[in-house]
Image (tube, grey):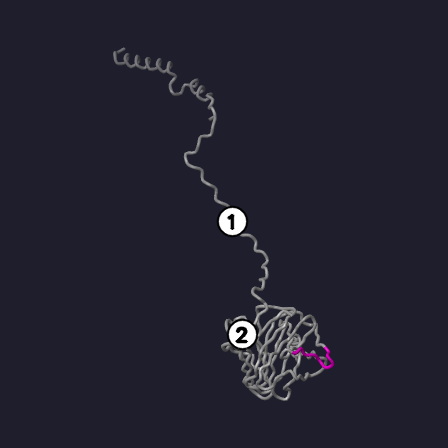
Amino acid sequence: MNKKFFLLISILLIVSVACSFTGGKNNPEKQAEVQNEIIEEPTSIPEPTNAPVEPPAAEEVEPTAEEPVAEEQTGDPYYVDEFDEDTASWYTWVVAGDASKNFTQTKPGTILFSLPSSETYAYMANENYDYEDVIVEAQMTATIYGDNGLAVACRISEDGWYEARIHTTGQYAGSFQVYRYDQALRDEGKNPYVNIIGGLERVNSVDILNGSKTNIVALRCVGDSIQPIINGVPQTLPKEVAITDDYLSSGQVGVAAMSFGNGKVEVEVDYISVQQP
């Protein structure tokens, strides 16, 4: 056996003996020890390295809207309006004639009804207040006068109103009438003016000042009593019979002017007074 071969066998023998003592990478006993080791659970949860994220704030829920409460009337419902300042609370409408036109205008200290043609009925009312019982009074002067009507009204609503109407010129000068305007009749195409003076067409009164003289016309509406007051004098029917009607219970107050069969009428209203009865 030559020396090289002997040397190779010797090296292999030494390596084999060394592996038997170290166990090598594939020592099954060593692997079993590793597998049988018990991994201890940590005794506490480690603190996070980053601050916790705050949960998003709950969205605010809008409260359910409550039923609207009707606005209370503000200011003094009893007043004297001389039309020197704001007249925005007064509105107008036309019952007879051209309803597309406005027949009223404000002058300093005066409301002017200008009715350029016959058969025109123009009204004006204050939308700020409603009344059950009230006295409404207006100082009125016919400055241009064909056959005319000058009126004050109470309990104006969508159902109608009451009005006291005086005549200062024409064939009916010196007389008054009292009507209930009935909107339901108007909707049916009927005459909406219901006479409430006991079947009489009109009542003559010595208290009316005719022509271009100034009259103070009032209407007292209390319960079912509907009473005209002309130049400070309460009016009744013949034999002192009272005027009554119980159809309308509440509403606004206003004034009106009418032209009848023979042309132009102008009426100035110097003030309107609303009084507690």
Q: Is residue 204 left or right of residue 139?
A: right
Mark sitting on residue 82: 2
Nearer-the-camera pick, 4 or 189: 189
Tell me what residue is drawn at x 61 percent, y 82 percent.
149
Left or right: 4, with 52 as reference point: left
Where residue 168 sits in the image (x, y, percent)? 61, 85
User: Going by the image, does 226 lie left or right of 32?
Assistant: right
Residue bounds of the magenta highlight? 233-241
Task: Provide the secondary structure element on which disc 1 rests.
Answer: loop
Q: For the residues carrying marks 2 and 1, which lies nearer the camera in this image?
A: 2
Q: Quadrant of residue 239?
A: bottom right
Residue 106 lies in the magenta stretch: no
Q: Mark 1 sits on what residue? A: 60
Please state which amino acid type lies under the numbered disc 1: Glu
Q: Name the residue rendered at 55%, 80% in the picture.
A: 268
Q: Is residue 236 magenta?
A: yes
Circle 2 Cα neighbour tier, 10 Å, few/some/many (<14 / 14–19 / ≥20): some
- Residue 133 sits in quarter: bottom right
Say what amino acid the circle numbered 2 marks. Glu
Q: Observer-nearest residue: 42 or 186?
A: 186
Considering every residue shown, the one lying at the far left of the view is 3
Q: Position of residue 93 (x, y in %)?
A: 57, 76
Residue at the far right: name it. 239
All told, the count of numbered labels is 2
Q: Is residue 150 above or below residue 246?
A: below
Residue 124 occupies which quadrant of the picture? bottom right
- Location of residue 185 in the rendering, given as x and y in whole percent from the top left corner: 66, 77
